[in-house]
Image: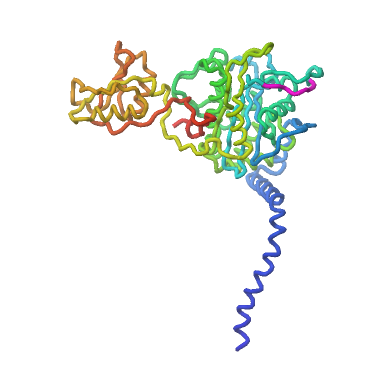
């Protein structure tokens, strides 16, 4: 009996001894084996859903391959996270004649890049930062051989989208890396066909606009409100350049809004959790894209898993800061020249894997078409509550509206529902003001003039913060996905 007690404590002392010995080699092999295990698990999940290994392999085989990194030297140092150069071309070979007429896709393609973006996926796979590079950006191409004519060119200035015309994906990557000092890890090229197919397979993408959008060049015609766009309509939306005076910069903002909506649709609709649906979407995307040799099914599956935890607030969008608009270059025309200091800090943030909107408080303002600073308001108290007009006037002024600061009493003090009276010529301003007064009634009054009138009713509680749709904050003009999605 005395011998029994020592055995019991002796066993637990021996059991943990081998564990420290086994841990170091596991740590050294973790990146390689973890990736293999994750990929294998993905294949198993897809196979269990009836897709099978052959289909998974066929997805990879369906990608057209390019080698944009061939013979590249003196490249930037790699940072943290993953950088994908996403370019949109005007390829339309697989689009039917009927669709070309319907969506105004006629004419010969220019074989250039309509869209150029750096998509940065953070190392922890919890954030996507998208930086748009204007296609009219002033750029200097390095010495190269024209891939179309075979002619050797010395270094010369161009608009950024001409890099693709002269040297294809390789020269595009070289030029972007030279301008940004951001090392590109992967290259993904999407044409009109793959874009339309992807949107249609997702069942359409919902976007909203505070004002009507009409562009005769693309045929886009959207009334103010919320719309679910099909693939063709979405293509019109992201291509439109003549909706307003903002031209290409306005178009890039719409492209960013659309990407935010696309991310929300992908993450909220269950596509990434449904292997069959994910397979269909992946087929649509890969059916007519070109990518580098290292960007395949494994990478797509890895990104899909990461995006399952994404929400609209996980994405952030910015356009490279412009220092000079309309920078004229002989033989090229008007270009956009980047601000060297601010753009340098933007690209440094990408290299350091830092959020572009770091330190910026979350903005809960309601987006409106007209900025409150542009709207003049006269407040009237329509109740018997003393001082209610003054409180409403002060609250509207604090939100940015140009109130007279001299509220008056309305002709009647029995108003129950707050009224926004406006001249029909200033209807956009009226809708923006009404958004700041939840539950208020819009009442057109011909001949009232530019000053809007608020008749405060007994239902008045507070003024909601509003902000113009296209107002962007911070040094880089960053906007989060949840700030531009439809409410």
Colour basis: rainbow
Residue 377 in view here: yes
Q: Residue 321, position in %: x, y?
A: 57, 26
Residue 393 is left or right of residue 311, and the answer is left
Tell me which residue sits at (72%, 19%) in the image: 165
Q: Nearer the viewer, residue 159 or 5?
A: 159
| Magenta highlight on residue 452 | no
Residue at the spot x=51%, y=36% of the render? 312
| Residue lying furthest front | 341
Q: Is residue 142 magenta?
A: yes
Q: Quadrant of residue 372?
A: top left
Q: Position of residue 346 (x, y in %)?
A: 59, 32
The residue shown at (69%, 50%) is: 31
Q: Nearer the viewer, residue 281 or 381?
A: 381
Q: Is residue 91 visible?
A: no
Percent across and percent down for residue 195 are 62, 27
Number of marks drawn: 0
At horizontal 37% and vertical 26% (from top left) the residue drawn is: 400
Q: Quadrant of the C terminus?
A: top left
User: Camera-side residue: 90 or 350?
Assistant: 350
Main SS, magenta residues: strand
Picture quadrant of residue 434: top left
Horizontal and vertical percent position of residue 280: 63, 35
Above-or-below relation of 474 to 137: below
- Magenta part of the chain: 139-145
């Amino acid at each position: 009996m005395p011998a029994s007690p020592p055995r019991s404590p002796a066993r637990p002392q021996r059991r943990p001894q081998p564990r420290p010995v086994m841990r170091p080699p596991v740590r050294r092999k973790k990146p390689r084996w973890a990736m293999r295990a994750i990929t294998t698990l993905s294949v198993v999940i897809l196979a269990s859903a009836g897709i099978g290994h052959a289909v998974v392999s066929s997805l990879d085989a369906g990608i057209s391959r390019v080698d944009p990194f061939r013979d590249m030297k003196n490249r930037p140092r790699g940072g943290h996270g993953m950088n994908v150069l996403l370019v949109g071309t005007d390829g339309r070979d697989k689009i039917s004649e009927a669709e070309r007429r319907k969506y105004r896709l006629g004419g010969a393609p220019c074989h250039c890049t309509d869209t150029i973006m750096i998509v940065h996926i953070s190392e922890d796979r919890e954030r996507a930062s998208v930086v748009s590079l204007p296609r009219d950006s002033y750029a200097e191409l390095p010495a190269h051989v024209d891939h179309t004519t075979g002619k050797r060119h010395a270094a010369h200035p161009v608009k950024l989208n001409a890099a693709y015309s002269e040297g294809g994906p390789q020269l595009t990557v070289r030029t972007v890396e030279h301008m940004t000092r951001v090392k590109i890890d992967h290259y993904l090229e999407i044409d009109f066909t793959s874009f339309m197919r992807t949107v249609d397979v997702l069942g359409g993408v919902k976007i909203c606009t505070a004002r009507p959008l009409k562009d005769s060049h693309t045929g886009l015609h959207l009334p103010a409100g919320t719309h679910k766009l099909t693939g063709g309509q979405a293509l019109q939306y992201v291509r439109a350049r003549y909706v307003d005076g903002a031209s290409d910069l306005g178009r890039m903002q719409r492209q960013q809004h659309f990407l935010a909506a696309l991310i929300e649709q992908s993450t909220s609709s269950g596509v990434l959790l449904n292997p069959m649906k994910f397979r269909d979407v992946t087929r649509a995307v890969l059916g007519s894209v070109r990518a580098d040799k290292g960007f395949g099914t494994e990478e797509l599956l890895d990104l899909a898993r990461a995006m399952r935890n994404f929400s609209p607030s996980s994405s952030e969008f910015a356009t490279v800061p412009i220092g000079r608009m309309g920078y004229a270059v002989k033989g090229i025309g008007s270009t956009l020249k980047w601000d060297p200091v601010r753009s340098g800090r933007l690209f440094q943030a990408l290299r350091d894997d830092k959020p572009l909107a770091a330190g910026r408080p979350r903005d809960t303002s309601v987006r409106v078409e007209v900025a409150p600073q542009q709207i003049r308001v006269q407040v009237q108290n329509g109740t018997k509550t003393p001082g209610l007009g003054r409180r409403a006037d002060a609250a509207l002024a604090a939100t940015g509206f140009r109130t007279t600061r001299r509220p008056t009493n309305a002709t009647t003090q029995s108003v129950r529902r707050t009224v926004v009276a406006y001249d029909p010529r200033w209807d956009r301003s009226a809708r923006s003001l009404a958004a700041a007064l939840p539950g208020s009634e819009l009442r057109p009054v011909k001949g009232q003039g530019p000053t809007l009138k608020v008749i405060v009713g007994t239902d008045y509680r507070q003024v909601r913060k509003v902000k113009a749709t296209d107002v962007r904050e911070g040094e880089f003009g960053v906007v989060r996905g949840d700030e531009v999605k439809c409410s």
